[in-house]
Amino acid sequence: MAILFDWYENPQPGDKQDGETTLHPRIHFNGSTTTADLRRYIQSACTLTETDVSAVLDAVSHFMGRELNDGRQVHLDGLGYFRPVLGCDGTVTPETKRKSTMVKLKNIDFRPDKRLLSEVGFIKVKPLKQRSVLRKKLTAKDVDKKLVDYFDGHDFMKRSDFQSLCNMTRTTATRYIRQLCDAGKLENEGTMKQPIYVLKKK
C-alpha cells in the first residue's frame, strides 16, 4: 500500500512575502495502530500471553520514563534512541531572575536505528487529489473581486470563510487577511481570539 500525502506551502518570512512559493509533503495517515494491535502481534510471535505482553510494555514505559527523567538517553536495540529535550516557559535573557525555574520538558526526541529504517524499507507514495495549493495562485485583483462579491451578500467574514472563498490553507489565509488589514481593506470588529472581519469604511 502506498503512503498518501498532500502538498502544503512553506511559511515565508515577513520580508519575503512575495517570494517564490515552496512546498513540503505531509502524510495523510492511514489510521492508527494501537497498543492492543502490538500486544496481539507480539503474543502471536512468541509464547507470552497478552497479559504478559501488557506487563512488559508497562514496565518498558515506566523504565524509560524514569531514565529520561534523570537526563539519560535511552537506546532500544532495533528501535532507536530516545532523549529528553528542554525548552523554556517564556523568554529568557542573561538578566532574567530565577532562570532555572523556567526550564521545562519540551519533548522526547526520537532517532530511529538503521534496523527500524530497513524494516520500513523503500516506500511508495501517492498524492491525494490536487489541492488548491497546486493550482494557479490568485492575484491581488482576484482576491479583491472575490471580497467585493462576498460582501455583496454578507455583513461579515470569518477566517474560515476567506479560506474557503480563496481556496487557501489556514496558514496562508491567516497571513493574507493580516495583509489586507494592514492595507486598509479589511478590519476586525471582533476580538483577537475571535476575529470578525468587515470591509473597512473609507
Image (tube, grey):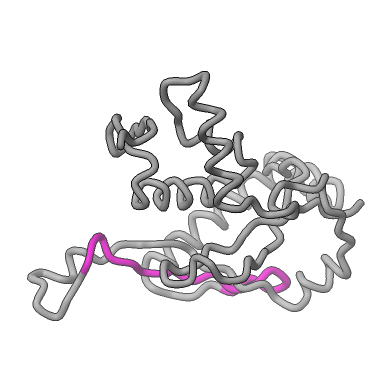
Of residues 191 and 148, the one drawn nearer to the viewer in this rendering: 148
Q: Residue 69's spot in the image, x, y percent?
A: 38, 65
Looking at the image, is 195 positioned above or below residue 112? above
> Toward the viewer: 63 or 180?
180
Q: Residue furthest front?
A: 202
Residue 185 horizontal side relative to residue 41, left or right: left
- The x, y position of residue 117, in whole percent, is 77, 72
Does the magenta segment cover residue 88? yes
The magenta stretch spans residue 196: no
Q: In percent of the image, x 52 and y 68: which residue is there?
A: 109
**Residue found 71% across the figure and 60% down from its top:** 25
Residue 63 coordinates in the image, percent (x, y): 49, 60
In the foreground, 58 or 119: 119
Residue lying at 11% horizontally and 72% vertically, measured from the top left: 96
Residue 185 in the image: state x and y as whole percent. Answer: 39, 43
Instruction: Say above or below: 168 vs 23.
Output: above
Residue drawn at point x = 44 percent, y = 62 percent:
107
Q: Is residue 28 left or right of residue 124?
A: left
Is 101 located above or below residue 38 in the figure?
A: below
Q: What is the magenta range?
A: 75-91
Quadrant (top left/top right/bottom left/bottom right) for the C terminus: top left
Looking at the image, residue 3 sits to the left or right of residue 184; the answer is right
